[in-house]
Image (cartoon, rainbow, N blue to C red):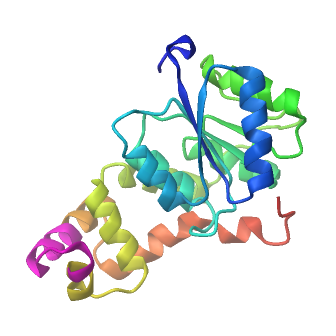
Amino acid sequence: MTAVNDRARFLIIDDHPLFREALHSAVQMAYPEVDTVEARTIAEALELLADAKPFDLALLDLSMPDVHGFEGLLQLRTRYPRLPVVIVSGYEEPRIISEALSYGAAGFIPKSARKSDLAAAIRSVMEGAIYVPETYEGQPPDADSTDRAEMVQRLAKLTPQQLRVLQMLRQGLLNKQIAYELQVGETTVKAHVSEILRKLNVYSRTQAVIEVSKLDNAELFRDQAGF
């Protein structure tokens, strides 16, 4: 991680301008000299992360318009495994916090936290700690959580292009449609699909979509507070 004195960069990923401003203010309280960049969608965040100049920390809202459940976190973790990603969310259920940590989040900050607490949490993560709310009590992983964690490890083996192909498979696109979108030949797409199945240890594209869809955990977010 870049030393904060070396002009580190933080990426705030949230679709609500008021809360992006609140996070920016908390970051400035913790580290006045840090450069802060904002993204309104996961797609926009990935474009920024592709920049040659790396980021040292990402602050991510779970409720983003272009992803479901933990999909945004999974995309960031699989494409940029060395980037610490802290969840800042209105969902504060212990099970959701546990799931986020099992998927590699560097911390979980409730949006209900005061600005001073947000700043302290950011400092804690930058110093190498895993931040969780004081009220959080860890939950033992169940069989489903273990299976999902194993799938996350398999996803981490995919290349960025293979991840894009997998996302298009989830959208129901055919090989020729994927080839058109990626501007490659169908043979290349078939090779990507074969590698995806091998790395995910599944036997068909349908099974791949089903298994990866389980990671969205949409059921965890039903009937919960928004943001």
Q: Is residue 101 above or below residue 142?
A: above
Task: Give the residue at x 73% y 53%.
Answer: 96
Q: Is residue 136 above or below residue 143?
A: above
In this view of the protein, can residue 173 be seen by the observer?
yes
- 161 inside magenta stretch: no
Q: Is residue 186 above or below residue 161?
A: below
- Left or right, 225 with respect to 158, comes to right
- Left or right, 213 with respect to 186, comes to right
Q: Which quarter of the figure has residue 174?
A: bottom left
Instruction: Give coordinates of residue 37: x percent, y percent.
Output: 57, 41
Residues 202 and 133: in front is 133
Task: Give the residue at x 42% y 76%.
Answer: 209
Residues 21 and 217: in front is 21
Task: Give the residue at x 18% y 75%.
Answer: 183
Instruction: Give coordinates of residue 204: x percent, y percent.
Output: 29, 78
How many dots with numbers? 0
Q: Which quarter of the figure has residue 11?
A: top right
* Part of the protein shown in magenta: 180-194
Instruction: Give coordinates of residue 210: x percent, y percent.
Output: 46, 76
Task: Give the residue at x 87% y 63%.
Answer: 225
- Prevalent SS, magenta region: helix
- 185 inside magenta stretch: yes
- Left or right, 42 with respect to 141, comes to left
Q: Which quarter of the figure has residue 54?
A: top left
Q: Is residue 73 above or below residue 24?
A: below
Instruction: Give coordinates of residue 227: x percent, y percent.
Output: 82, 58
In this view of the protein, can residue 207 be seen by the observer?
no
